[in-house]
Image (cartoon, rainbow, N blue to C red):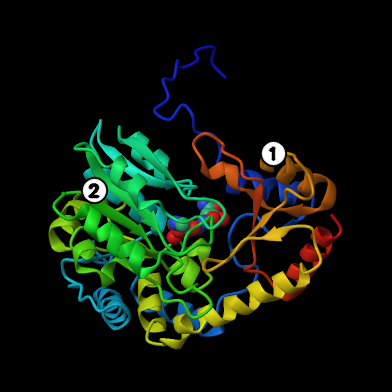
């Protein structure tokens, strides 16, 4: 190494390595059961895998159109119209992207200027705040109310100022596993009426919602759809988190600005995979059956934890189960998550990682997108604590 060291002035001085990487690495080092980072430990559907050779051997290996393969955009439009009642124009209002993280980042970059305020609910998925800050924006935090993680809409009203450019929401919510109700959405619609605030609605868990609840997409509410980016991820829906594929919906005038950034950031998402997904999406049951599939996993995990000293918080959506541990120890959640990984062989995510001030309600997040065998082994360790 040369002697010169660059005097870096970081654009993200407070940012370290994401908690998902930290905990998955620690789990691997200690050979622990990894219920931390959210990803399935099982293969995606054989029908989906079977389409891969077909489309990678079909002469489709050059750039697809900038906004995405039309067949995929068309079937996405059909799906959202059928499920949520809003018609998005595939030509101007749907863009296929390399993952939801990218979709969120691009929407923020297209709209947030230095000094703009962006409302985020805490605990917040960890990519939101860095996306805001690297663009010079200022996150304005509204805390969800433990233990139901409900929203105080008056606090949201107080957080809105003339500088508010954007609001980011996420339902079903990671990491709290709570979901927005129709009343929540109507409250938000009312608050934003008459403003020019843009909404980024992270809906990557749209199909993972339990106990008969319905996903409240912003696209169901005219007063929200007209100002919103809806972000979805094929990674969650089809158990292919490593593919990094997703899509974004927005009215034309918003999507035009989104594509100005998109075309110079990545230009296009993987082409052959878009054809694979377009064909696979014809099978509606593949996503409509997900709620049942994951609800069974949640219930299995909870049944295995029945006589543990952890207190399960409601998991109404996502593939996460939060467990409150006050009855077991007074340790901070980060310390406990690390200790359980090292000493007991089970990895989880501390919820304080999702608060800017490391607020700690003594809750750990466990991912149940795992085989029953893995969940049973994990629960056995937790029951013994
Ligand atoms: N938002 C939330 C709430 C998530 O949990 C995740 C996933 N892991 C993402 C966005 C990112 O999805 P993707 O892997 O498609 O970028
Ligand atoms: N969304 C996943 C989770 O919440 C992880 C994604 C990532 O590792 N970046 O665990």
Residue ID for mark 2: 261
111 vs 178, nearest the viewer: 178
Residue ID for mark 1: 332
Quarter holding residue 133? top left
Dot 1 beta carbon under 8 Å from ligand 2: no
First of labels 2, 1 by sequence position: 2
How crowded is the residue under tag 1: few (<14 C-alpha within 10 Å), some, or many (20+)? Answer: some
Residue 89, image x, y percentages: 17, 73
Where 338 sits versus 253, above or below?
A: above
Q: Which mark is residue 124?
A: none
- The residue lying at 26 percent from left, 77 percent from top is 77
**Residue 248 showing in the rendered view:** no
Dot 2 beta carbon under 8 Å from ligand 1: no
Asked which secondary structure carries label 2, the reply is: helix
Where 130 sits versus 381, above or below?
A: above
**Residue 140 showing in the rendered view:** yes
- Which residue extends farthest front? 154
24 to the left or right of 154:
right
Where 338 sits versus 297, above or below?
A: above
């Amino acid at each position: 190494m040369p002697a010169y060291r660059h005097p870096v002035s970081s654009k993200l001085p407070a940012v370290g390595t994401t908690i998902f990487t930290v905990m998955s690495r620690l789990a691997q080092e200690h050979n622990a059961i990894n219920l931390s980072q959210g990803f399935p430990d099982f293969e995606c559907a054989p029908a989906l895998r079977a389409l891969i050779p077909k489309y990678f051997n079909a002469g489709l290996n050059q750039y697809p159109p900038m906004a995405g393969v039309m067949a995929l955009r068309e079937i996405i439009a059909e799906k959202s119209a059928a499920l949520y009642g809003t018609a998005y124009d595939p030509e101007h209002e749907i863009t296929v992207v390399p993952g939801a993280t990218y979709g969120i980042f691009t929407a923020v970059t297209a709209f947030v200027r230095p000094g703009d305020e962006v409302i985020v609910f805490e605990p917040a998925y960890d990519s939101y705040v860095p996306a805001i800050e690297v663009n010079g924006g200022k996150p304005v935090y509204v805390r969800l109310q433990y233990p139901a993680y409900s929203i105080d809409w008056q606090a949201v009203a107080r957080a809105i100022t003339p500088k508010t450019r954007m609001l980011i929401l996420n339902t079903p919510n990671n990491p709290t596993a709570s979901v927005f109700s129709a009343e929540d959405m109507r409250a938000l619609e009312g608050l934003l009426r008459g403003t020019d605030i843009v909404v980024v609605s992270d809906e990557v868990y749209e199909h993972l919602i339990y106990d008969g609840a319905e996903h409240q997409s912003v696209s169901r509410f005219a007063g929200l759809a007209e100002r919103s980016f809806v972000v979805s991820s094929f990674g969650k829906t089809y158990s292919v988190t490593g593919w990094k594929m997703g899509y974004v919906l927005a009215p034309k005038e918003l999507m035009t600005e989104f594509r100005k950034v998109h075309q110079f950031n990545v230009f296009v998402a993987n082409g052959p995979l878009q054809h694979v997904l377009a064909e696979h999406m014809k099978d509606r049951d593949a996503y409509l059956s997900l709620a049942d599939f994951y609800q069974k996993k949640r219930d299995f995990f909870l049944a295995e934890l029945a006589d543990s000293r952890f207190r399960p918080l409601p998991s109404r959506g996502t593939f996460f189960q939060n467990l409150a541990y006050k009855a077991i120890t007074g340790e901070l959640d980060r310390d406990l998550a690390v200790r359980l990984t090292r000493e007991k062989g089970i990895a989880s995510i501390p919820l304080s990682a999702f608060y800017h001030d490391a607020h700690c309600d003594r809750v750990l997040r466990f991912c149940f997108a795992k085989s029953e065998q893995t969940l049973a082994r994990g629960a056995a360790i937790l029951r013994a604590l």
